[in-house]
Image: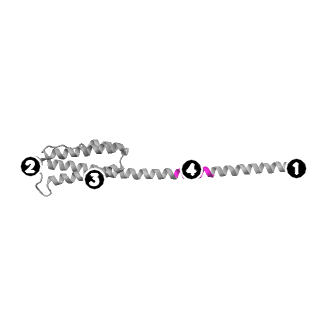
Amino acid sequence: MAANLTTALIGLGGAVVGGGMSSFVAWLTARHSRQLQRDLTVANELYRQDSVMRTERREAYIHFLTALHTFNEAVMTAWPAARDDELEEGSPSPGDQLRGAMHELYFRFQALVLVSTKEIRDVASGVIDEMKISGDVVTRGEVHMIQEMNVIAAMRKDLGY
């Protein structure tokens, strides 16, 4: 009977150890699964935020480029008028159009600064500096257009295109 009791105790001990190990592994797996789920949730939120920022940057870039193009068109309209000393004639006058385009470009620059990278801010600052030169040059009857392709290339690179 002692042998049967010993066998039963060994069997019971094995079952307790096996059950304990099984429970421990199940707990460890569940804990690891919860941690992975939290990590996945954080990663998804970061991806969503990055996507939102990318969209905001893209929209700011589009508005800035549109304003830059409008400014260049205003330069081309104002240049002959300034050359012929008719900058303030007409309704709206080429001078008014140029000033409006300058204000719009500067406004879009300010919005761009809020969402863009340092590289794009530097490129856009160069555009604003050129815009000031262009406005002065046009009023003297000369033409100075800002090159849009350099700006577009920098923005495409920033967006990963």
Query: What stretch of residues is rendered in magenta?
Result: 30-40
Instruction: Name the magenta segment's main secondary structure.
Output: helix
Looking at the image, is mark 3 or mark 4 earlier in the sequence? 4
Q: Which mark is residue 85?
A: 2
Report which residue position mark 4 lands on: 36
Query: SS class of the residue under badge 3?
Result: helix
Real-space Cα separation, disc 3 to disc 4, in angstroms: 45 Å
Q: Residues within 10 Å of mark 4 (few under 14, many from 20)?
A: few
Report which residue position mark 1 lands on: 4
- How far across and how far down the image is residue 6, in percent? 86, 48
Q: Residue at x 21, y 52 (%)?
A: 101
Q: Is residue 131 or residue 91 the one in the foreground?
A: 131
Inspect this view and state whether residue 161 appears. Answer: no
Real-space Cα separation, disc 1 to disc 2, in angstroms: 118 Å
Looking at the image, is mark 1 or mark 4 earlier in the sequence? 1
Residue type at the position of mark 2: Asp
Real-space Cα separation, disc 3 to disc 2, in angstroms: 28 Å
The extreme left residue here reads: 84
Residue type at the position of mark 3: Phe
